[in-house]
Structures are given as structure tokens and as C-alpha cells.
Image (cartoon, grey):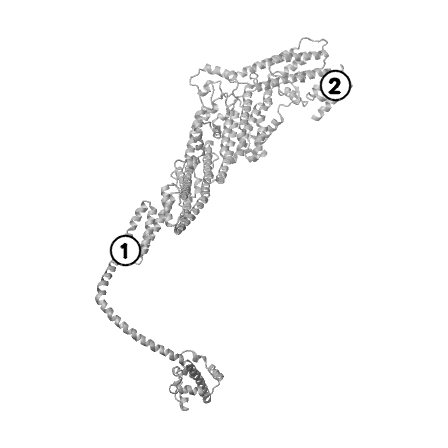
Amino acid sequence: MQKIKSLMARQGLKSPPDSMADLSPVENFKIPSKEELRELREQPIDPQAEQEIIESIEEIYFSNDSFDMVQHELEKLPTELNLLELEEYRDRLKRQQAAVSKKVADLILEKQPSYVKELERVTALQTNLQLAAVICTNARRQLSVSKEGFTEASLGLLANQRKRQLLTGLLKSLRTIKTLQRTDVRLSEMLEEEDYPGAIQLCLECQKAASTFKHYSCISELNSKLQDTLEQIEEQLDVALSKTCKHFDVAHYTKVQLAYTLLGKTQTAMDQLHMHFTQAIHNTVFQVVLGYVELCAGNADTKFQKMQYKDLCTHITPDSYIPCLTDLCKALWEVMLSYHRTMQWHEEHDKQATTPTPDDAVATQSDELGIDRTYVKKKLEHGLTRIWQDVQLKVKAYILGTDMSHFKYDDFIVVLDVISRLMQVGEEFCSSKSEVLQESIKRQSVNYFKNYHRARLEELRMFLENETWELCPVKSNFNISQLHEFKFMDQCRSPPLSPSKQGAFQIQEELSLFQKYLQDGNPFEMHIEQKEEETEDVLASNGYESDELEKSAYQDYDSDSDVPEELKQDYVDEQTGDVPLKSVSRETIRSKKRSDYNLNKTNAPILTNTTLNVSRLVGKYMQMMSILKPIAFDVIHCVSQLFDYYLYAVYTFFGRNDMPVPSPSLPTHGGRESGTARMVGPACLYESSGLGLISSRLRTTLNRIQESLIDMEAGGENTALHASTEDRKEKVPSPHLSQMVVLTNSGTLYGLAQRVVATESLVFLAEQFESLQSHLDTMMPAAKKPFLQQFYSQTVSTASELRKPIYWIVAAKAIDYEQMLLLMSGVKWDIKEIMSQHNMYVDVLLKEFEMFNTQLDDISRHVRIPLPVSNVLWEHCIRLANRTLVEGYANVKKCSNEGRALMQLDFQQFLMKLEKLTDLRPIPDKEFVETYIKAYYLTENDMEQFIKNHREYSMKQLANLVNVCLGSHINKKARQKLLAAIDDIDRPKR
């Protein structure tokens, strides 16, 4: 800067402040004088050149008034100054200034008329303002006078009144604040009284009032306090809500719901309620189980409270299992009943809801309430399944926590009853099939039933091996439905009611458990009490004081000392337990015994203690099956095994012809000689004829039982080598006949009384099974019904077929057929004269039949012999006698026509006397003997046809027929031909 100034001084120029003062913004744009304007107009400048000069001016000159153009130009100077350049630049700036000044002058001249007009308006405005100032001055002077005369007196009074009103409002506000400060005491009292809606209403009003006085500093603290109080109320309200989960009270729940409605948290309350129900289920079952575990554990140091519920259930003892289960179900019932009543409350509350009014505000509020009610309804409906699922899981853990395989039957039935009632509750609660409970109880039932059935089979074997097969006296109309084990079946039938009681009975039956016990009682408590009473009634009506007494009651009815007092009466009534009031003498008892089984009780069922035990077991099995239908097939299968084992035992004891009795040798149908059993001869006679004692169906049944149920290797040395342990676990050793039963005494017809009791008790049992078929069929799953049908068609229906092999053994021994053969062998048949007197062997045989008939009469005085049994016995004896006759005739070496006539005479005499001893018609095998005798008269051709058509005769009998006829009317050639035909018939049998 100093260099520029020194340069200007050397050139004789003024300093910028002196010489360029006219370049300041103010001076640069001052209005030119008329002379300057005239000069500027006179200068001949081209407008386009002038415009180019103006456009060449830097834009910064047009920026703002604070622009320092001198400073700007000085800063643009180069470091090396050149005078010529500076002068040239200065001239250019002057030209620019002249162009701008000329432009400004032109614009001023152009706008001058407007300026003059506006100046006149300003002058007029100035005049008006002066007039307004005068008016204001006068008004102020007059207002000052009014203030002195009116305002200070009258308006002062108004100001004081307003001040008084303000102070009154302030006093009221202070009193309200004071009341708000004391509301915590009242809120505490209302909470103690459980007046939750009132407490919330009061708290909300206080909050509203506090918001009105929020401009006071003390209110901020009060607001915070009220908010804390409201939160405390919500906490207590949540606790009150949780109490309804166990004991629902309508008034209490109404208060709680109204309180939540005031809070606007109806949906939140429902969410909390479901959480409380879930927690209530867990806490309830845990506390119940924990109480029993600690009670049974005594002073044990185990910390049960820290255990999981599932682990805790494993510490329940068998003795406390049922009481704990009952209390568990009672407690869970209370929870579900509370939920049920909660739903009822909401349904009734929804019905009482008022219809929306046309008012918009009320309509909006009603819409919100409708949304809440819809949410609550859906939440409650969905909660049903959730609550029941929680209950099932808790009870499942309890059921599976204990091994019930060694429980007593009655205890296990009680468990099934309780669980069945619980599943009924679930069905009514949420229409659930209780799959979780069914699966868990099925697992326990299958496990229990396998062990129970195994033990019962062993017990049945023990009974059978100790059974003396004495008659058990029962009432003439006795059937197994009268046993208390079958009382459960009466519940399936509606008892007859008078018309006056039918309506009330139907109403009572239609009530659900929740309707019956809505206000009072518990279905599980009532159910258990009912079961206990029924058990007491059964024990009383059964007439026994203990199981041991029951088992030994009829072991020996000939000994008065062994007979219980009940059995010294006429009979034991299984249904009512009635006994005569009068005492009976021993002689009367004995006489009654003889008459009971002969005349007065001709229709009384024949059965034994073991039969009753099997019947009771069947009743218990069916009771378990009716309670737990998923294992119905397993139970029915086990029921069939009970019958199978009883049938197999009766056959094994009395139907096998393996009792050695010395006898003369008789040829068997296989051509071998047998000298081991007296009955072998008649047996061979019977079997050789093709008429088997055991039908193919019965034989198949016995083989099936032996393969599937009987452990044939039991007691053997190499048992493990023959069958696996698992397979043998499902089988039972074959029973052995008690040594008390003697089957070799001819005086008792080889144990005929015991055989009759055993066989007919089996037939009676089969008849009772037939009566149960329809009930079993309804319980059996559809896929398994063919098994039941097969059991009845192939096993139950074959029981009566055991009569043939069992009574045949008696028939084979009762008559001395061997003696008859010996007597017949001593008869001379090649006589020449026709005899009028029959042979002695016929009288001997008839005498044997008379003795047999007498023995039957003696036995029937003690044991009733039913007509089918009598017919089978007579049929066997007559059939064996006739076949023995044929065998005796077949042993004849020589025989004449007169001898044939004598044979016919003997047989006719035998038939005539026999028909007087028995009512059996027609006489069995009568044609068998007559046809054989008449065959002696056949020609060669007829004989050959006879041999082909009559396969019922043995090869020996047919060959003897041919040999005896040789010489009379058959030659040797014909004999060889006929023997060859016989051999052809016998060849396929070898």
C-alpha cells in the first residue's frame, strides 16, 4: 500500500481518499444535476456501445452498499506497476462510470412524474397525522377526567371481587389437594375389603384431579404416588384373579372383572387368567404328591421339594397310591370346575350385555366391549384344550411313575375307575378322547394284566391240582351273572322303574358331572365311596368271610366238621346270601344231601369250586375290559386261555386212556398185540371201526391249546434247550390230577362222580360263556372279532364233545368185555341142530349191565347224572358190547348155519333184556351186529360187494368171515379172491 501511495505522489496525483472520494457508493449514485443530465444527453454515445461498457463492469460492483471499491481496485494492482497500464485502466473505469451515470440519469428522467405524484401523497399524509395528534391529545385529556371521577371508584370494587373469586377457587383447590394427599389411607382400606373396582375408580379419579392441578409443585409428587398405588392395586388384583383358579366365587370374580374393565385391560386379564390356571395345575398336583411322599418318607432327609414333579411321582408308595390319585383328581377337578364356571360367568355376562345406542360415543364404546368379549370367548374356548392337556400330562406322569404290576386286583380296578371317571370329565370338559390318558393307562394295564393273568393261571393250576371234583351245591337257578364280579354288567341295563320315577331318573341321568357337582361335591369322592359300599355289599351277599373259607367251603361236603355254617343250609344263594333262620340237625343235613342231588335238585347246575373261581376270574377280566376298552382284545384273549386251560385240564385228568389196568391181550387195529391196558381191547375195537372218540375239531383244539398254552418241558432237565424263556413265560405247566381223586376203583365206576362233576362243570362253564358272547362281541374291536368267533366255534362249542372220551373210559371198564370174549370162545358154533336156548355169555353180559345200572343209581344219589351223560354212558357200553360180540363172532373157527341162528338168538335175547334197562333208542350198533351175522349167508359176489361197502369192520373180522364160509358156499379160489380184496382195502392204511 505504501508503494502505491509513493508512486502516486511521484506522479503528482492525490491520495485515494482525496482524489477518488467521488467513487464512494454514496457519491457514485447521487442524483445528477440538470446540467449534468443535459451534458450526458448531449454526448453522442452509441446505445449498443454503452450497453457493452455496462456489461463489462465486474459483477461485484453490483453486490451491496458495503462494497469497498477502492480497496478492491488496489488489491487488483500487480506487484510491478506500469503507469501506462494504470492510466489506461483508469480511463476504462471512467468510461464505465460515465456509462452508468448516463444510464441512471435516463432512468431518473423517465420516473420523475411518478416521483412528483408520490411526494404529494406524502405531504397529504403528513397533514392527516397532525390532525390525529390533536384528536388524541383531546381524548387523553377527557380520559384523565373520567379516571378521576369513575374508574378508580367503581372498577376498584370489581377488581376486589375478582380477587376474592380467585382466592375462593384457590382455597377449593387446596382442599382438593389435601384430600388427594389422604386418599392412600382410603385406598388401603378398600384393598383390604377387596373392593377392587372402587379402589381403581377412586385412584383414577384422583389421577384425573391431579392432572387438573398439575401446575402446583406439590402435585408432581402426588402423581407419582398415585401411579405407584395403581400398580400396587394391579398386583393385588392379579393375586385375586389367581385365587379364582381353585375356588371360583361369582361375587369375587365379578369384582375382579369389573376392576380390569375399569383399567381397560380385559384382554390382559384373560391372558393372565390362563397363566394362573396353568400354574394352579402345576402347584396343585405338586403339593398333593409332595404331601403324600413326605408323609410316607417319614423323617428322611431327602429334599423332595427340590425334585421335579415327574421324579417326585416315583416316590409314591403302593399303599398311598390310590389315596394320592384320588386327592390328585379331586384337586384337578376343582381347577377344571373353576374354569367351567368361569366360562359360564362370561356366557351369562355376554347375554346380559346391553344393546348399543345410536349415540356415537356409546356406540364406539360398545364396539370396543364387543371386541373384548369376542377375544375373551375365543381365548376361553382355546384354553379348554390347553387346560385338559396339562391335566392329562400331570396325571400321566403320576400313572407311569409307579409300577402297578403287583397291585391287588381290587386296587387296580379302583385306579381304572378313577382314570375312567377322569376321562369322562375330559369328555364333558372339552369333548376330548383323552388319548394321553388312554395310552398311559393302557401301558400300565397291559403290564399289569400280563402279570396278573400269569399269576391267575398259576393259581388256576394250583386249584386244579388240589381239586377233588366234588359237587359244589348252588341254587337251582344259579348262573354266573349272580356273582358279584358280574354286577358291573347290571349297570349297562336300566333297572325297571315305576312311571312316577322314570321322569326324575331320566333327568338325573341326563345331567353331566359339571351340572351335578356345580355347587357342591366331587365326582371322585362320590365314586370311591360308592365303590367301597358296593364291595361291602358283595362280601355280605357272597356268604363268605374270607377267600380261604370260600376256597375250602365245598371241599368235603360229607364231613360236617369241615362244612361252614352257611353250607349246612339247604343251599348257598350266590345272589342274595340268604340263609334259613332255623337251625338244622345233622341228620336233616345228611338226608337233604341225598335228596338234593337226586330228586329236589334235578335241575341244579353241576360245578365245582374251581368252576366258580374261573367264573369269578372271567367276571374280573370283563370288568377290567369294560373300564379299559383299548385292551379289550388282550383281556378276551386271556379269558379264552382260562377256558382253554380248564378244558385241557379236564381232558388231561379224565379223557386220556393211559391208566394201566392188567388185561388179556387183544389185537389192535394196527396188528400189534397189547397187554398193557384192559381198555385197550375195546379201544381198538372202537377205533378200528373208524368212529373216533375225539372229533377232528376237538383234537385240533386240544393240539392248539397244548402248543400255545401248555409248557410241556416244565421240570425237564434240558428245558432251556427246547424253548426260550420269553416263550415259556407265556405258558403254564400241564396240571396233575390230585392224589385224592381215585379213578381206579370199580366200586365208584372208576371215579364216575368226579368225571361227571368235572365234565359237566366244563359244559356249564361253556354255557355261561355262550351267554356272555354278545357282551364280549360289543367290547371286541371290529378287526379282532374273527378271533372271538373262532374261539366260540372251535373251543367253547367243543366242551360237550369231551363227554365221549371221558365217559368212554368208564364204559370200557364198567363191563367185563374180556370175560365175555373168553366165554364166547368156549361156545361151540358148528352145531347141527337149531337151539332154542341162548348161550350163558348173554346172561353174564346182561348181569354186568344190571350191575352197571345199579351203580349208576347209587352214584346219582350223590351226584346228579344228567340225561345226556346217562345216554353217552349207555351208548358207549352198548356200542362196546356190540362190537365185542362182533369180535367174539369173528374169533369163531368153525360155524354152521345152525350156529348162525344161535348167534341171532343170543343177540335178540341180549337186545330184549337190554331194552328193559335203558330208555336209549335206537340201540347203538344194532345193525352192526345183525349185518355181520347175516353176512355169513352171502354168496361169493355178494360177499365181495359186502367187503367193499362195509369198511366199518376190521380186516380180521372180514377175513374171518371169508374163512368161516369156506367149504359151505365159497370155494378156495373165491376165498383167495376175497382175501386179496380185503388186503387191497387194508394196504392204504399201512
Q: Which residue carries the number 1 mark?
A: 173
Q: Which corner quadrant holds the C terminus?
A: top right
Q: Amino acid at mark 1?
A: Ser
Q: Is residue 277 above or below residue 651?
A: below
Q: State the image quarter where residue 33 is shown.
A: bottom left
Pick whichever, 374 or 471, lies toward us. Answer: 374
Neighbourhood count class around disc 2 (C-alpha, 10 Å): few under 14, some 14–19, many 20 upward:
few
Q: Residue at x 78, y 19 (%)?
A: 973
The local secondary structure at tag 1 comes to helix
- Decide which of tag 1 and tag 2 comes sooner along the chain: 1
Neighbourhood count class around disc 1 (C-alpha, 10 Å): few under 14, some 14–19, many 20 upward:
some
Q: State the image quarter where residue 273 is shown.
A: top left
Determine if residue 794 is in view: no
| Spatial separation of the CA atoms under disc 1 and disc 2 | 143 Å
Pick whichever, 372 or 710, lies toward us. Answer: 372
Residue 817 % position (x, y): 63, 16
Q: Which residue carries the number 2 mark?
A: 942
Q: Is residue 977 left or right of residue 800?
A: right
Q: Residue at x 24, y 63 (%)?
A: 155
Q: State the image quarter where residue 649 is shown.
A: top right
Q: Is residue 62 left or right of residue 801?
A: left
